[in-house]
Amino acid sequence: MLETIEKWIAENIRGIAVVGFASAVLVIAGLGFVYKMTEFSATIMRDDVAGFGATAIAVYLTGVVPLLFLTLWAILSGRFSDIERPKYRLLEMHDEIEAAERGARRG
């Protein structure tokens, strides 16, 4: 059992590292976003500077919310289920094109 787990980790170490790094970046960015939204809300409630950063926040949310929904749609619809297949298909197509070119030169 332990040998199987170690083998799986060795085969998937790159993916594990990418997911770990992406998760860390997402957590750090999320914490920064939550901090800025809290600061923004506190500024509006205290009425220190009317409308402080409202435009920047609106533009940010206008860009991020659609990307969030697009990413969720892609994950839930299975678009990321086989992310390795396109590169292999590209190599297969390249081989097919080269074979067709060789055949055209001969014939």
Image (cartoon, rainbow, N blue to C red):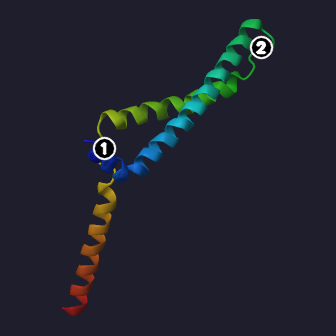
Q: Secondary structure at mark 2?
A: loop
Reading the image, the residue beneath label 2 is: 50
The part of the image, by quadrant, that contains residue 39 is top right
Q: Residue at x 56, y 38 (%)?
A: 25
Q: What is the three-letter code of the residue carrying label 2?
A: Ala
Is residue 103 toward the left or the right of residue 35 in the image? Answer: left
> Which dot, 1 or 2, sits closer to the camera?
1
Q: Residue at x 61, y 22 (%)?
A: 34
Q: Residue at x 39, y 32 (%)?
A: 72
Vertical arrangement, residue 93 with respect to residue 66, above or below: below
- Quadrant including the N terminus: top left
Q: Earlier in the sequence, mark 1 or mark 2?
A: 1
Q: Residue at x 66, y 16 (%)?
A: 38
Q: What is the three-letter code of the residue carrying label 1?
A: Ile
User: Which mark is drawn over residue 5?
Assistant: 1
Residues packed near mark 2 inside 10 Å, few (<14), some (14 to 19) or many (20 plus):
few
Mark 1–mark 2 Cα distance, whole angstroms, equals 57 Å
